[in-house]
């Protein structure tokens, strides 16, 4: 069973860039789709981006494409989320999640089996 740990959150200014990390232990990423979600206070958990680890293919929704990118470091079993031009609307807890179906990239949080504890990102104006 894979365990996921996020890091890299903090308080940033509007317009700043940020890189979050998701590191896996207890298993290899190669069997999974690894995704980033975020959840703002009072809102549902929202899909941000994902990577099909066995192919290295990133996946984005139209609303997130352009400001968020994902990249992977297989040697470190780490998935990165790169964000730019952050706004206060990006303030949320950012979660890393894994789905053990490597052939689909679901955007619903209900289809992910494993979750990290989350890392808080606060964007001040």
Image: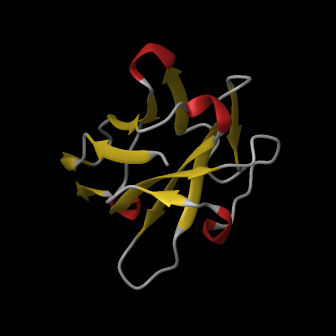
* Residue 90 placement, left or right of 58: left
Q: Residue furthest left?
A: 11
- Measured as percent of width and height from the top left, residue 97 is found at 51, 53
Q: Residue at x 57, y 47 (%)?
A: 35
**Of 44 and 4, which appears nearest the observer?**
4
| Depth check, front residue: 94 or 73 | 73
Q: Extreme top residue here?
A: 75
How many marks the image carries: the answer is: 0
Does residue 52 show up? no
On the rendered structure, is 120 left or right of 64?
A: left
Residue 97 is at least partly visible in this image: yes
Q: Residue at x 70, y 39 (%)?
A: 59
- Image quadrant where residue 22 sits: top left
Residue extending farthest to the bottom is: 42
What colouring does the structure picture have?
secondary structure
How far across and how far down the image is residue 26, in percent? 42, 39
In this rendered view, identify the residue nearer to me: 123 or 21. Answer: 21
Q: Against 111, is 4 above or below?
A: above
Residue 103 is situated, as x and y percent measured from the top left of the image, at 82, 41
* Quadrant housing the C terminus: bottom left
Image vertical order of residue 22 relative to residue 88, above or below: above
Q: Nearer the viewer, residue 124 or 56?
A: 56
Could you tell me which residue is drawn at 70 percent across and 26 percent down? 54
């Amino acid at each position: 069973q894979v365990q996921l740990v996020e890091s890299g959150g903090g308080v940033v200014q509007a317009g700043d860039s940020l890189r979050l990390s998701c590191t896996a232990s207890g298993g290899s990423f190669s069997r999974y789709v690894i995704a980033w979600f975020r959840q703002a206070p009072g809102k549902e958990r929202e899909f941000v981006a994902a990577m099909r680890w066995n192919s290295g293919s990133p996946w984005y929704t139209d609303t997130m494409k352009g400001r968020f990118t994902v990249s992977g470091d297989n040697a470190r079993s780490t998935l990165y989320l790169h964000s730019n031009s952050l706004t206060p609307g990006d303030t949320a807890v950012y979660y890393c999640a894994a789905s053990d179906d490597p052939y689909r990239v679901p955007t619903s949080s209900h289809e992910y089996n494993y979750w990290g504890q989350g890392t808080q990102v606060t964007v001040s104006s």
